[in-house]
Image (cartoon, coloured by chain):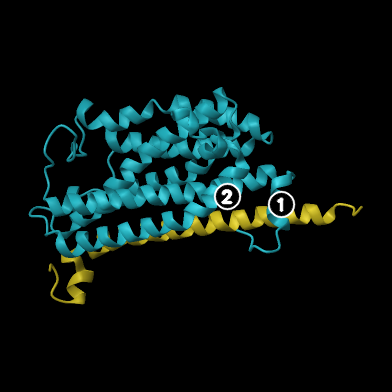
Chain colours: A yellow, B cyan
Amino acid sequence: MNWNNASEFFAMGGYGLYVWGSYAVTAALLVIEPLLAAQRRRKALEHARDAIDREPSQ
Amino acid sequence: MASRIPWFTFAAPSRFYGLAAALEPWLWFTAAALAAVGLYIGFFIAPTDATQGEAYRIIFIHVPAAWMSMLVYLVMAGWAAIGWLLNARMASIFARALAPTGAIFTFIALWTGALWGRPTWGTWWVWDARLTSELILLFLYLGYIALVASIDDVRRGDKAGALLAIVGAVNIPIIYFSVRWWNTLHQGATISLTTAPKMASTMLTAMLLMTFAFWAYTFAIAFSRARAEVIERESATEWVRGLLARPDRKTP
């Protein structure tokens, strides 16, 4: 084990800002991207559904 | 034998949609599981680096992201070329689906590189060949995304994008070999296929696990975005109507 306690872990031997700055941005991007893709698919499906609803019924 | 495998079945957007929807949850799970194990080994088992201290732990995402930024570009250009030359719609959709992910990995490589370079080299950025060519890669991705988005005729956009992607592929070997061809501040390859890795095996394990996690992530996000793209392009077709009409199933 590299760390004796949580504060040592977060300090990263004085490099905490650099290490956590890297991981935080990476994690944020890799969480937001799938959410945006799923939102885009939902919108596309809604669009398709609206287009069908607008068609004159036979 | 090979002819019995219906390779082209999934070239049909309707078949692809179903297959991708079924695979996606497994791919997300695989990505998360690999990342969890990789980060555990990277932070709790891999030892402190003798010269860089704890700052080196950035490489567990920096190197996999940099690898993915180049690999995704080649795959994107390949699909774009197939979509153009064979007039295959699904291939062009894959190319478009990969571009934002490639751009994000490129940005991550640059961002984490800067945060690693500051404490290690004493600078956020230098205009050396490796860093500059990686920045050009980011612009190529952004250029591709902007170009295909700016052309209203979807198939024309696919073709224009393919041309840009193929021409831009020349940048990939430049990035890859830049540390050998020029005297760069960026260090040479630590991992190569021809020599033993110059790092502790636990460090290497963590880095490879993160690489596989990014692979799984890339498949999952590309499938997800390709499905959105498929619906946008095919909204008037019978199979999308069928997908929307099915009352027994939640819309995927």
Left-right relation of A16 to A45: left
Q: Nearer the viewer, residue B189 or B25?
A: B25
As drawn, B170 above or below B140: above
Q: Give the residue type at disc 2.
A: Gly
Query: Camera-side residue: B127 or B202?
Result: B202
Measure the C-alpha gap from mark 2 to mark 1. 12 Å
Front residue of B203/B188: it is B203
Q: Secondary structure at mark 1?
A: helix
Q: Indicate the position of residue B45 as horizontal and vertical percent values.
A: 15, 62
In depth, the one of B84 and B188 nearer the eye is B84
Q: Which amino acid, by three-letter code, is at mark 1?
A: Gly
If the image is split into quadrants, where does the C terminus of chain B sit?
A: bottom right
The image quadrant of residue B202 is bottom left
Residue placed at 77% from the left, 56% from the top? A50
- Relative to residue B113, is residue B236 drawn left or right? right
Residue drawn at the location 52% of the way across and 39% of the way down: B94
Q: Residues within 10 Å of mark 1 (few under 14, many from 20)?
A: few
Query: Residue B242, which numbered label?
Result: 1
B20 to the left or right of B209: right
The residue that disc 2 covers is: B18
